[in-house]
Image: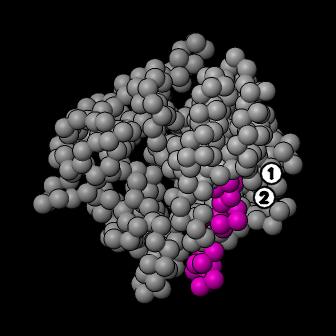
Amino acid sequence: MHVLVIGGGGREHAVVAKLAASRHKLRLSCAPGNAGIAQVCPTVPISAGDIPAILDWTTEHGVDFVVVTPEDPLALGLVDRLAERGVPAFGPSAAATRIESSKAFAKEIMRRKGVPTARYGIFTDFPAARDYVMETCGPSGIVVKASGLALGKGALVCDHADEAVRALEELMLEKKFGAAGETVVIEERLAGEEASVFALSDGERFITLPPGQDHKRLLDGDAGPNTGGMGAYCPAPVVDARLMARIEREILAPTLAGLAEVGCPFKGVLYCGLMVCDGDPYVIEFNARFGDPETQAILPLLESDLFDLMYACHAGGVDRVETRWRSGACTCVVLASGGYPGGYEKGKVIMGLNEDFGPDVYVFHAGTRVEEGKVVTAGGRVLGVSAWGADLAESARRAYAAADRINFEGRHLRRDIAWRGLARLEAKR
Ligand code: AMP
Ligand code: GLY
């Protein structure tokens, strides 16, 4: 079976690595991939958003199944176009992807189904949005979000009303994120601990993966600007078995039912970004795809066949696929280019990639490419170094031991990935 994976980040490297271990002996290709993925399977120089080129390549090369992980091709309807050609795929339709690509739509589904989320208002008119900020912004601040896709940068967490009005001006008047900011969601700022819970859904039934936690800020102690994610770990103790059962019952089941009720059953992985406030879960965002870098910490723990799960999301019966998870924990430390998430230089030679890191260490490539036979940096987030350990502390230690053997000019990493989980486990002792 020929399987084409769309995307070229650390998340896709983790997915490709798991699919390569499938008992189905898949023939894999990845578009566009990166230098790490190229060591696992052939890569195709087509960008993830080039729908016509992907469709042509799929037909020309007899692709049997397509795994679509990034949000752009999902929102552009790649899975729908493939279905029209009779090619099955892992990933939701464009209509179901609105749970990510339209925050206004996501809020409407949550409202209809009574799913706990921050209180909010939706606006297309600047003066009305400004009035709402002035009326509702309290001492804890407020959050202004572009409703559409904005490269993960569309959520502006504001301390004061003035800052929120400035954010509204940027989105609605200056159109910083283009059409994505024509509609804005303004919401209550929640205080608590974040967690990421992924559900694999076949449109009717779902299973959940062990909970992860991302570290979005650039610097230790969760300081500095927001990034795509500087590291992650799994399982995140903030979501214990009792809370997971509530998340399934109060959030995932009604949201997936709500999507089916409006005629767009969700098939694929539903990413639920949560804030846990005094033990209660609230939805901060939904995504229609795997998270990055959470996936690099979650998938190494999967013992069963990822392809079986992905295929069942398309064909049905995802809850009947045998799913086993390894005990222990996995931590992923991201190595980023100096300057990221602002401007950074590319083309720095990466040293140490061929070291023997021992068992259960995974060096997932994100922004890398091969230049004159050498692997060089080609993006903001360059690598994600993941390691399994018998417990969270051991996995973090092993991930850092490996990460410290890899270097490139300007390398930046956080030193405290998994700190909230470690603190929580320590407090329990
Ligand atoms: P999003 O793009 O919606 O994931 O938001 C990016 C980040 O902004 C989240 O990971 C949170 O740290 C923060 N955030 C978003 N919404 C809220 C909220 N209602 N309250 C507090 N923080 C939020
Ligand atoms: N880890 C955040 C995201 O994938 O959106």
The residue singled out by tag 2 in the image is 259
- Label 2: few (<14), some (14–19) or many (≥20) C-alpha neighbours in 10 Å: many
Farthest bottom residue? 60
Q: Residue at x 66, y 67 (%)?
A: 93
The image quadrant that residue 407 belongs to is: top left
Q: Which residues are magenta?
A: 80-103
**Can residue 23 be seen from the camera position used here?**
no
The residue singled out by tag 1 in the image is 109
**Can residue 279 be seen from the camera position used here?**
yes
Which is more N-terminal, label 2 or label 1? 1
Quadrant showing the C terminus: top right
Q: Residue at x 65, y 66 (%)?
A: 94
- Label 1: few (<14), some (14–19) or many (≥20) C-alpha neighbours in 10 Å: many
Q: Residue at x 77, y 33 (%)?
A: 132
Three-letter residue code for mark 1: Ile
Q: Give percent across and percent down for residue 195.
A: 61, 34
Q: Give percent across and percent down for residue 288.
A: 62, 55
At mark 2, the secondary structure is helix
Q: Is residue 184 left or right of residue 297?
A: right
Three-letter residue code for mark 2: Leu
Q: In the picture shown, does residue 324 fall above or below 140?
A: below
Say if mark 1 contacts mark 2, CB within 8 Å: yes
Q: Report the front residue among 65 and 46.
A: 46
The image quadrant that residue 9 belongs to is: bottom left
The image quadrant that residue 37 belongs to is: bottom left
Tell which tag, 1 or 2, sits nearer the viewer: 1
Q: In the picture shown, does residue 24 fall above or below 324?
A: below
